[in-house]
Amino acid sequence: MAAEVKVPDIGDFKNVEVIEVLVKPGDAVAKEQSLITLESDKATMEIPSPAAGVVQALKVKIGDKVSQGSPILTLESSEKPSSPQKTEPVAATPSATASDIECDVVVLGAGVGGYSAAFRAADLGMKVVLVERYPTLGGVCLNVGCIPSKALLHTAAVMDAARELGAHGISFGEPKVDLEQLRAFKDKVVAKLVRGVAGMAKTRKVTVLTGAGSFENPHLLSVQLKDGKKTVKFNSAIIAAGSQAAWLPFLPEDPRIVDSTGALELRARPKKLLVIGGGIIGLEMGTVYSTLGARLDVVEMLDGLMLGADRDLVAVWQKMNAKRFDNIFLKTKTTKVDASSQGLKVFFEGEKQQSNVYDMILVSVGRSPNGKKIGAEKAGVAVTERGFIESDRQMRTNVPHVYSIGDIRGNPMLAHKAAHEGHVAAEAAAGHKAYFDARVIPSVAFTDPEIAWVGLTEDEAKKNGAKVGVAKFPWTASGRAIANARDEGFTKLIFAEDTHRILGGGIVGTNAGDLISELALAVEMGADAIDIGKTIHPHPTLGESVGMAAEMFEGVCTDMPPARKK
Ligand SMILES: Cc1cc2nc3c(=O)[nH]c(=O)nc-3n(C[C@H](O)[C@H](O)[C@H](O)COP(=O)(O)OP(=O)(O)OC[C@H]3O[C@@H](n4cnc5c(N)ncnc54)[C@H](O)[C@@H]3O)c2cc1C
């Protein structure tokens, strides 16, 4: 008997696009075998056959829009179809097939960590569901982090460079800033990247669910969509739910007080900006606002800015940037802010008690992980007091089929670490013997000049009493740095005293963030000073400074005065 198979109740979805037709006329299909795949803006779902039989004729093609009751195909079958095939509307509750999805891997959070994990898992042949609470993929990095901040820092660097050309006899006059257009440029950069990620999810047939996910049990995640709930059954889960900006409890609610996300919105051009927190994110955003015309103050509880980097690297940045700052308050606590129409009066407690008035405050006091907001306890997954979800070198949490990666797993909170961990987790979930084996994770402050470091720092070596040798090549001896009129920087390599193997290094100067990759590779490969020094670096480049620093360590650098005999 030939019967028409129609789209069953698919909840509130209407005019949903057919993205795959999985059978053709003549195919024998089993009951529950998927016939077509539909994709709405919220979910992808497969429509199963209501009975076993042979496909007679197709009634849909890729690109058609279908709703409940639309014909899919005719099926020659001796069985009675098991689900209702009436065209009249049925109850509004979504059917089990439409609302419940089964997959090999569910990834919670579509930041750099999450989408990297999802794509790697899909490339390994697994059926993947990627759950993201926001309408765009890419998480913090693409939407409100690395990318928009670098778009603005690039603009600021070009503005600063144009000003400095006055000393070369080239003048453009004072720049005119159209904040709206600058915002549009930054948004366009973000849009291009997030569109690219969405496209790659589609190409890889990763099912994307837009909604907040929460564990129900160790194999079930529920996702709160805009219009109803869906449950996802999984064999493995990768938690990549990231982090969010930390806030100070005593701050009043005021649009002039922002975190990094608010700062990236470029709501205004303040004349006087206070950055609370002297870490990388605050100083990067401070650089942007300063180039746009703000005078800066920074307040930091600890005794230095950009802690983690060697002090000699930071000193070069601080000297170059002194002109941007009115005050750098170290070992100072912000205790209170009074908001009024005259400004934001901020009270400090440090070596001396004082207060100042600002017209904008950027709160950049770190990021807190989202571990306590995803129902982890229902899956039996342990969450630390601070909200991290710890995992082993395969990224497995205390529940072995549940993995954690990225910011939620721990420090350093960096996009490249999240992506790397995502790959490890996906490979482990696919049964590979994948481990986090990287020796080092590079760090970069995209300030001007940039500061980048990797592996053992000189300050750490001194503290630990490690037997190291340090070679520091000043950029005043680099032809390229001098030609660029940016010779304030240096390249420093740190070697084991006995083996001459590189253990780490730091660079301060323009493009340090790009240059650091060579040092990371050298550490990973166990290179020694001769390997690096004898590698031919192209001339004239800033990269030469790496080879020359290695030559200095061996006492054979001809671009520097002769080394003293030891
Ligand atoms: C201003 C700024 C600049 C930065 N610059 C750099 C830089 O230059 N280089 C660098 O390496 N790093 C930088 N970072 C850090 C970097 O952005 C993060 O380390 C990176 O985004 C972490 O990726 P992730 O995938 O672990 O988490 P996230 O990017 O935080 O992604 C987590 C995702 O999970 C989603 N999510 C959370 N809970 C749920 C839920 N219950 N259901 C569904 N979805 C959920 C979130 O919406 C988010 O999209 C910067 C950060 C900021 C704020």
Image (spheres, rainbow, N blue to C red):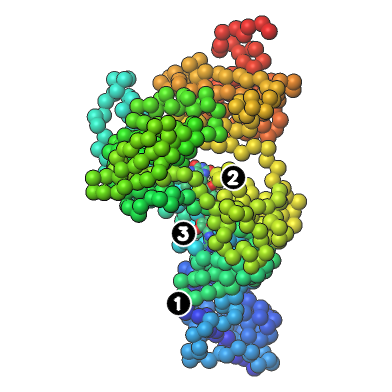
Tell me: 561 left or right of 270.
right
Amino acid of disc 3: Thr
Q: Residue beneath label 2, please?
A: 411
Quarter of the image where one finds residue 519: top right
Which residue is at a point 56% across and 45% down the rendered structure image?
413
Amino acid of disc 1: Asn
Which residue is at a point 60% across and 90% down the rendered structure image?
3
- Kindly tell me whether mark 1's CB lies below 8 Å from ligand 1: no
Q: Residue beneath label 3, please?
A: 136
Amino acid of disc 2: Asn
Q: Quadrant of the C terminus?
A: top right
Q: Nearer the viewer, residue 437 or 297?
A: 297
Depth-wise, is mark 2 or mark 1 nearer the camera? Answer: 2
Residue 17 lies, in percent from the top left, at: 49, 72
Q: Nearer the viewer, residue 8 or 227?
A: 227
Residue 324 lies, in percent from the top left, at: 35, 30
Residue 15 shows which numbered tag? 1
Q: Residues within 10 Å of mark 1 (few under 14, many from 20)?
A: some
Q: Residues within 10 Å of mark 3 (few under 14, many from 20)?
A: some
Depth-wise, is mark 3 or mark 2 nearer the camera? Answer: 2
